[in-house]
Image (tube, rainbow, N blue to C red):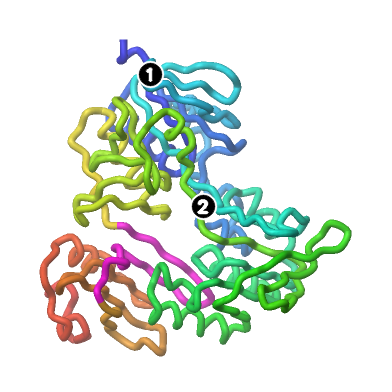
Amino acid sequence: MMENKPFVIAGAGLAGATAARTLREEGHDGGIVLLGAEQHEPYIRPPLSKAYLAGKEEASAALVQEPGWYEENKVDLRQGVSAASLDTAAGSVRLSDGSVLEYGKLLLATGAAPRRLDFPGSDLAGVHYLRSLEDSAGLKAVLASGGRHLVVIGSGWIGMEVAATARTLGNEVTVVGRDKVPLRAALGTVIGNRFADKHRTEGVIIRTGIQPLELAGEDGRVTAVVLDGGERLAADAVLIAAGAVPNTALAEAAGLAVSNGIDADESLRTSAEHVYTAGDVANAYHSTFGAPLRSEHWANAIEQGKTAAKAMLGQDAVNDAIPYFYTDQFDIGMEYSGYFPWATADPVIRGNLDSLEFIAFWLQEGRVIAGMNVNVWDVQEPIQDLIRSRRTVAIEDLTDTAKELTSL
């Protein structure tokens, strides 16, 4: 019977590990099997481009649970073992070690993978991607002592965070991006330009509106990036940071509905009975925004891990946490909540944009749908309240620093 079969979690990242913990905290005393392709206990990824890469934290600081937690809570964590195929009719998963595991409920938390770029020289030594602890450790070994030339291909979050960390460590850094403004897809042109200006002030060279044609090398190791106009950028190392692709192959092969990730309802149920999804791979309906959203940020992995676990237990759990993320680049500290791409205009600025101490709001039909604070603190709660409430707010009230956000 179903109650005698374990709950299986495919993916031992932050979402999967959070779901396992939530199942136990909510009273589930049945079996839990947590499958992880990596030979590590589950860990969080933000430090990989920041504190761990900079040498400020050890790898142990990134662990999701304290040492011994899985054994103490009878969670069967299988490291180096992943789900290879899924039979939803039989309620079973074939594992990478050849064994077959029946499940009572299944959570697909298979995450995302770096988008690979295929052009001449992309297989040379010294070409890096950043997703795992091993990736970060390999990059750190190159950058830690400074004095190297790093070319970053991609001007999104990973690219810009690594650029800041590498430059702080004393390396020469060039960022190459196809978009004309770094971080534009995440923050828009106005704010993206401010981040770009800060990087330039700190000595990062930013080349926009171009893309690499090939990577040149000597003796099997990368030495230069050749741009589409023929220019060569010297490089001791290259980071390809071209975004991430959700790991949907397992779900697709099993016939689950997949679009921009694994499709799910507001309780993170997929199109297959007893199968749920969470984290980077989940394209789940969001009750606040009234549409499906897929988020690759750590806060989303935590919240969806909790929601999925409660839904698996039959509770009335809803995917309604406001998307949230943060970044640290040089002396810029930023927190962001919401989903700005639906905004109908440039952001409304509260504070001083030029001094990088401000709050930005993005609106749709007079309602705040996203907000970010830069070097201004303790304002995320009222920002999220504005988003969640869907109430209309006058622009002059948002920009009036004499008015508390909690009063709007």
| Residue that protrudes farthest toward the right in the picture | 219
Q: Is residue 305 above or below residue 94?
A: below
Counting from the top left corner in percent of width and height, residue 263 is at 33, 41
Looking at the rendering, in which quadrant would you find the N terminus?
top left
Comparing 318 with 260, the one in front is 260
Q: Quadrant of residue 163?
A: bottom right
From the viewer's perspective, is 300 left or right of 398? right
Residue visible at 72% across and 71% down? 226
Which mark's residue is nearer the viewer, 2 or 1?
1
Q: Label 2 to label 1, Cα distance in Å?
A: 31 Å
Counting residues from the start of the chain, the first of labels 2 and 1 encountered is 2
Identify the residue position indicated by label 2 in the image: 45
Counting from the top left corner in percent of width and height, residue 325 is at 39, 61
Counting from the top left corner in percent of width and height, residue 23 is at 33, 31
Q: Quadrant of residue 31?
A: top left
Counting from the top left corner in percent of width and height, residue 343 is at 26, 71
Residue visible at 44% across and 77% down? 192
From the viewer's perspective, is 185 left or right of 228? left
From the viewer's perspective, is 392 left or right of 303? left
Q: Which mark is residue 113?
A: none
Identify the residue position indicated by label 1 in the image: 91
Q: Of the residues shown, which amino acid type is indicated by label 1?
A: Gly
Q: Is residue 315 above or below residue 382?
A: above
Provide the residue span drawn in magenta.
Answer: 323-344
